[in-house]
Amino acid sequence: MRLFRGLRPVRRASAVRDLVAGVTLAATDIPQVLGYTKIAGTPVVTGLYTLLLPLVAFAAFGSSRYLVVAADSASAAILAGGVGEMALPGEARYAALAGMVALMTAGFLLLVRVLRLGFIADFLSRTVLMGFLTGVGFQVGIGVLGGMLGVAVRSHRPVMQLVEVARGLPRASLPTIAVSVAVLGVVLGLRRVAPRFPASLLVVMGAIAASAMLDFAGHGVATIGPVMGGLPHLTLPRVEWREMVALAGVSASCAVMILTQSAATARVYGARHHEDIYENDELLGLAAANAVAAVSGTFVVNGSPTQTAMAQGAGASSQLAQMTTAAVVAVVLAFFTGPLKFLPQCVLSALVFLVAMSLIDLRGLAGIRLESTQEFALAVATAVVVVGIGVEQGIVLAMIVSLLRVVHHSYHPDSGVLVPDGQGSWVVTPVGAGVVTEPGLVVYRFGASLFYANAGRFMQEMTCLVGRMPSAVRWIVVDAEAMTNVDYSAARVVMELKKNLTDAGVELAFARVSWSLQADFDRHHLTEVIGATRIFHRLHDAMKMFAWLPKE
């Protein structure tokens, strides 16, 4: 393992560009992570902490030169959904529970690394992930409406939050609404005319200055109040054992989201810049980042696509940019947290609302609907579960649905009989009694590996091909091109099928058998049962042998 792989080698020309990019990233990222604390339910200063030691830890142990690891809306929402049921935001116990979630998440990520289970990230399909993030967008957006309007909201459930906001509208604070609308207008306007300008930073600085000069707090606009300055104190979060057990599900959900989102982001930028990504080192870096987040008093951190894109847009080419961001944040924590007490809470709510809207991908969902109504339904169902039940349950559903789709495809593979089309190619005809490739021969294609769950279907279709008049079929050749392996249970089914076909006077053969499938045949004694002369590497060889046989 090489430390600071994502930073070395340091070259003078790129180093200057990275230093500038790091300062720019700090300017655009600080307001964003302050907003994420509103999602997570933690003190504002903890957002700054996510841009400090976690960035250094990932730079030290990770492998990606481009991935930015800090606070993230999705993982913050999962945290709040689980911890919010156990303590009230703002309490010392809530902060301790949030820290323990980060520490346990680091443990889960480290376990995944030790067991080499990083491939789990591939099982969360893009479809359900889009539905999950859309649901998170709606949940987070609804959750900050009260703050934008100056209406007190106590419920943690989006539907009830909407009800409370609707009931509280007559008592809404007009000055608060005016500030929120101004924030939305300025940020959206600057994004349109100057996309690279740090609009959020300008809004935060402007709001702080206006609040201090015009006494926003005295006019009914709530401010965040005094913010503790200085660098974080390193300490382990203290929680009881029973609380750790209760937090296991939340931590596992965070680990899944971090694993999936970080892996996808690192791969995208690694491919774009021809960078080798070492998944085990990525997991170690993510685990280290969450571990130091826990001991430095903040919450779970994640590889953020938006913040990575910000760093890229600013010209970052290595983790030196992220280290520079951490240095800027350290300076802010040491000397400039005092003015934050004037920052209106509705400003953070408005910034979070914009983040939430960016997560809602209605255009992407519409594209899925045009291509696959089933996948669209899965995405929408995932979003509904997130909004109606909870973020943690949504990520669990997303994982289960993604895995079930894999199992469904393996259980119901594309299968059929290969029939010549008269032009030198094959067409696949659905399985049925009397369907043959040519008189006396059936070439049956099974489009998946053969395992215990789909072996019964395999035998049922093969039996159907023989039909009630087995004398019409002399050979059945299984086109095993897509059959990469066979397990113990399926091998016993094939043995039984071989016996039944032999009793009916039908020969069973396999063609296009790969080396891995041949190894399984040897291990499960299928080579002996079927016969080595009935196992072919090419379909052409099987067809040729059938043609040589005497016709009855």
Image (cartoon, rainbow, N blue to C red):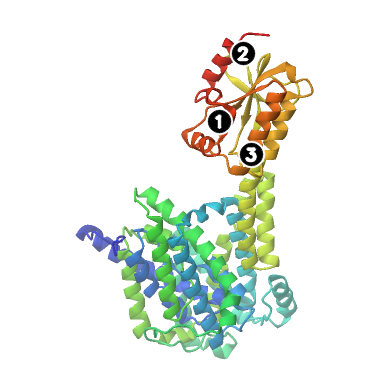
Q: Which residue is mark 2?
A: 422
Going by the numbered disc 2, the residue's amino acid type is Gly
Front disc: 2 or 1: 1
Res 52 seen here: no
Q: Mark 3 Cα within 10 Å, few/some/many (few <14, many 20+)?
A: some
Position of residue 320 measured from the top left corner of the image (x, y, whole percent): 29, 65
Going by the numbered disc 1, the residue's amino acid type is Glu
Residue at point 42%, 58% (across, down):
309
- 180 and 31: which is toward the camera: 31
Residue at point 54%, 14% (across, down):
544
7 over 204 or under it: above or below: above
Give the farthest residue toward the right: 468
Asked which secondary structure carries label 2, the reply is loop
Position of residue 78 measured from the top left corner of the image (x, y, whole percent): 58, 69
Q: Which residue is mark 3?
A: 492
Residue 143, located in which quarter of the rendered image? bottom right
Going by the numbered disc 3, the residue's amino acid type is Arg
Position of residue 171 measured from the top left corner of the image (x, y, whole percent): 70, 83
> Which is more N-terminal, label 2 or label 3?
2
Front disc: 3 or 2: 3
Labelled pair 2, 1 in contact (Cβ < 8 Å): no
Please identify the quadrant where the N terminus is shown. bottom left
Asked which secondary structure carries label 3, the reply is helix
Of the numbered discs in the image, which one, if any, rests on residue 503? none
Of the numbered discs in the image, which one, if any, rests on residue 528? 1
Give the farthest residue toward the left: 12
Distance in Å between CA atoms under marks 3 and 2: 37 Å
Position of residue 9 measured from the top left corner of the image (x, y, whole percent): 23, 59
Please identify the quadrant where the C terminus is shown. top right
